[in-house]
Every structure is written in structure tokens, then in C-alpha cells.
Image: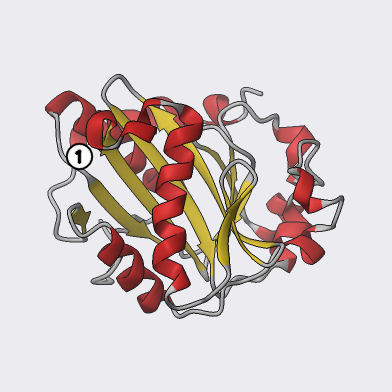
């Protein structure tokens, strides 16, 4: 069941939420659906590995277990992240013919993040896209993103920290071996920040930028059978999560 918030479509567990992103993408690809936008926020802390990231190279597993922070894995690429209260997750699913840049991985990331950055600059001047898919103010990152592509649809999802406890990231994540050049070897605390905007303002700004999209809410009809299959076979399956 979705958690009750009119602006969000959040399911109970992080495994369900990641499975739902994948279910939406597959459904859109198979049914030739138009642009889709989803907002969600995990109610507890969770560590989410990128599809090809290695658990013991990326995560302080013992600390996660001590604190009860769930470890999960998504189907998209990118680095490992910590999500939870104060971090808004934004999922954008687009037909690849929606805009020419969507034909390539790099182009899709730049296009989607560029639209989001422009929307946020109206409220917080100085928002820019940096690296391979980060949003920054100055040289400090407040959002990372990842991408997954199917034959006719592409999904870019991002996590935007607006009131997040940055210390949780340092506690649960090791220093990443792959870093963008602009990070300059800084620690998590030195490199990361929150954007000083309320969640409702973030949602309104981004929704306006994607006004042509179907915005999924708690009252939306979900691909329930597909969601349950994906959760059982992959996103809620410990052997799949810990396979690397």
C-alpha cells in the first residue's frame, strides 16, 4: 500500500520502491506510454547499490546492520547512495523519441538533469549539472542520478537532498573508488550538501518543468502483478542484492 502523502507515491519498503520504478519503466516500454513522473521519499534509511557495484567495496555493512539500515540494489547504473527522510527521489520515464539527446546515455542524462536544474534555478540560483549526472550549487553536490534504458523508453532517476542527515552517508558508505574530477578527493561531509528548499517547492518546480508528463500519485493504478514479480525475483531477493 502507498504511504499517505498527496505529493508522493511511496511504498512501504525500499525494495518495493525500487521494484516500482522498474515496473513503471517496463510497463511504459511495452505499452508505449507517454512521459511519466514519480516522486517518492523513503521513510527510513536505506543504502542502494548501483547495478554493478560491489557490496563490500562500497558499503560499511556492519554499520548498516547495527543501525537497521536496509541494503538494496537497483537495476540502473551509477554509484551507491543513501536515501531516507529528507531526500526526495524523482523518477522520469521518457520515450526515446521525446527529444534527440535521449538517443544516447550521456545525452539522456544531460537532458533530464538539465531540465531539472533549470527548474530549480528559479528558486535557488547557481544550480548546475556537473560530472556524469550530479546537481550542484557551487562545487558541492546535492543530487546524484542514474539511468536505465530499454528498447523504446529511458528512465533517469535522481535523489535530491533537501533536509538529509549527511553524516549518515559517511557512516554507511566507504569512500568511492570512482569519483568525478570536480570532487577533488573531498570527504563525503566536505563534498555533499542539502539544497535549501522545502520538499513541496522541489516537487512543484520539477512538476512544472515536466508539465506534459503523467504524474503518478497514491491513487494511480499500479502494475501490481509486475511489481510483485520483480520484488520476488530481484529487488527483494537477497541473493540478487548481494550478488556482487
Residue furthest out toward the top? 151
Q: Quadrant of residue 56 in the image?
A: top right
Scheme by which the image is coloured:
secondary structure
| Residue 217 place in picture, x, y as percent | 21, 60
Residue 234 in sight from this viewpoint: yes
- Residue at 44 percent across and 78 percent down: it is 123
| Residue 83 place in picture, x, y as percent | 56, 57
- Asked which secondary structure carries label 1, the reply is helix
Residue of label 1: 224
- Residue at 30 percent across and 61 percent down: it is 209
Apparent side of residue 184 relative to residue 25 in the rendered image (left or right): right
57 versus 91 height, above or below: above
Quarter containing the C terminus: top right
Q: Quadrant of residue 31 in the image?
A: top left
| Residue 33 place in picture, x, y as percent | 14, 36
Apparent side of residue 173 relative to residue 109 in the rendered image (left or right): right
Apparent side of residue 153 relative to residue 182 in the rendered image (left or right): left
Between 182 and 217, the one lying in front of the other is 182
Amino acid at each position: 500500500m502507498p504511504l499517505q502523502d498527496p505529493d508522493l507515491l511511496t511504498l512501504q519498503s525500499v525494495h518495493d520502491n525500487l521494484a516500482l520504478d522498474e515496473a513503471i519503466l517496463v510497463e511504459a516500454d511495452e505499452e508505449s506510454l507517454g512521459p511519466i513522473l514519480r516522486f517518492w521519499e523513503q521513510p527510513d534509511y536505506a543504502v542502494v547499490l548501483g547495478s554493478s557495484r560491489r557490496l563490500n567495496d562500497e558499503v560499511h555493512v556492519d554499520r548498516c546492520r547495527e543501525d537497521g539500515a536496509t541494503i538494496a540494489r537497483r537495476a540502473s547504473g551509477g554509484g551507491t547512495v543513501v536515501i531516507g527522510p529528507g531526500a526526495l527521489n524523482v523518477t522520469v520515464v521518457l520515450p526515446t523519441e521525446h527529444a534527440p539527446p535521449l538517443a544516447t546515455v550521456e545525452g539522456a542524462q544531460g537532458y533530464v538533469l538539465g531540465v531539472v536544474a533549470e527548474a530549480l534555478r528559479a528558486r535557488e540560483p547557481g544550480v548546475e549539472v556537473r560530472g556524469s549526472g550530479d546537481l550542484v550549487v557551487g562545487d558541492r553536490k546535492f543530487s546524484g542520478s542514474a539511468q536505465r534504458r530499454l528498447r523504446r523508453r529511458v528512465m533517469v532517476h535522481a535523489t535530491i537532498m533537501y533536509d538529509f542527515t549527511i553524516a549518515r552517508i559517511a557512516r554507511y558508505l566507504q569512500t568511492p573508488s570512482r569519483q568525478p574530477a570536480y570532487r577533488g578527493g573531498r570527504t563525503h561531509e566536505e563534498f555533499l550538501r542539502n539544497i535549501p528548499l522545502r520538499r513541496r517547492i522541489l516537487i512543484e518546480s520539477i512538476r512544472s518543468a515536466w508539465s506534459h508528463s503523467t504524474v503518478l500519485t497514491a491513487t494511480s493504478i499500479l502494475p501490481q502483478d509486475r511489481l510483485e514479480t520483480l520484488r520476488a525475483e530481484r529487488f527483494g531477493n537477497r541473493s540478487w542484492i548481494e550478488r556482487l
